[in-house]
Image: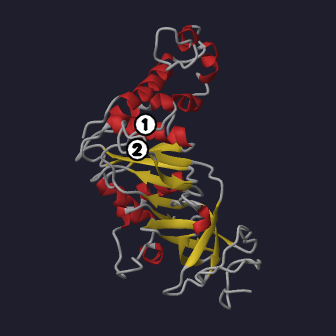
Amino acid sequence: MRRYGKNPDEDDIRVRPNRKGNRPRTHIRPKHEDAAEGMVLTVDRGRLTVLVEDRVVMAMKARELGRKAAVVGDRVAVVGDLSGKKDTLARIVRIAERTSVLRRTADDDDPYERVVVANADQLAIVTALADPEPRPRLIDRCVVAAYDGGLEPVLVLTKSDLASADKILETYATLDIPYVVTSREEFTDGAELARVHELLDGKVTAFVGHSGVGKTTLVNALVPLERRRTTGHVNAVTGRGRHTTTSALALPLAGSDGWVIDTPGVRSFGLNHVDPSRVILAFPDLEPGTVDCPRGCSHDEKDCALDAWVADGRADPARLYSLRRLLATRERRDED
């Protein structure tokens, strides 16, 4: 017999009686073939805001997913009440395979990795040229995390009216990372905002940076106020809004089918989870030279074959230096 309500979100299945009378039991998992597809916009204490077509729906993870968690950017299958009306709650029953993952650990000694964003195309690393001073080691760590997770890094350098961008750009020139330089004065006239918009157009871009660099100001300029209000999260218990940078939040890019994902400000970016063998894949001119490397080579040791590869003129020595600098960030703590 059925013990579900009139509008169940389960498939029709036979169940065996439960003597306790509290819940039907079955080993057969529902298929949810009629589940709707959606994108996770933000997560807050077990409640997920999901965009389903043109509706923002509150949802929770189905028990059948076990410990598998959905994060911002995940493509998910949702069942239940998808009206998006107040006090309704849907269920996430499937999480699609991810195309990319931005991960970090609290520090380099922490074995527990945290998935920050899924399915992003780019990682925009926002750095002020002054006030606060740029932190190249933190930039290096974000670049490594991007390469490791399958994202393309982008540099967004702010406050160029206070200091020159030449030194930072020279440091990362051999990595061929796209960049845009903005100033506080010219940013308001729209010209520099248009250049940033061009880099993000049609792509899902996660923004990362430490406090004070202008990350949230930039995101607010890229996303109209009415869209932030529509997509921004409201606590389901208190009814109060939360500041957008206390948790990752996906927002639609104005005038484009792209998305901007604002993430909380970071003081450090742990790389305990990073496998150096994946970072080398971001250097196609150097990667073939690793064939003759000893097993488990860190690419920064005496017998590394990359030295001979560069000596033979097959790659620019500056590229090998950049690779080794990035790999070394995993062994070096970033200073606040």
Q: Nearer the viewer, residue 192 or 1?
A: 1
Q: CA distance from mark 2 to mark 1?
A: 6 Å
Compared to residue 106, the image places residue 222 above or below, namely below
Report the residue marked by disc 2. 105
Q: Is residue 247 visible?
A: yes
Q: Which image quarter is the N terminus in?
A: bottom right
Q: Residues within 10 Å of mark 1 (few under 14, many from 20)?
A: some
Q: Nearer the viewer, residue 125 or 99?
A: 99
Q: Is residue 188 visible?
A: no
Q: Position of residue 125 (x, y in %)?
A: 41, 46
The residue that appears at 47% across and 59% down in the rendered structure is 261
Q: Position of residue 116 (x, y in %)?
A: 46, 53
Q: Position of residue 93 (x, y in %)?
A: 63, 68
Q: Residues within 10 Å of mark 2 (few under 14, many from 20)?
A: many
Label 2 secondary element: loop
The residue that appears at 29% across and 40% down in the rendered structure is 134
Q: Amino acid at mark 2?
A: Thr
Report the residue marked by disc 1. 272
Identify the mark nearer the N-term, 2 or 1: 2
Occupied quadrant, residue 11: bottom right
Q: Position of residue 197 (x, y in %)?
A: 50, 57
Compared to residue 154, the image places residue 191 above or below, namely below
Marks 2 and 1 close (CB-CB < 8 Å): yes
Q: Nearer the viewer, residue 224 or 333?
A: 333
Q: Which image quarter is the C terminus in?
A: top left
Label 1 secondary element: loop
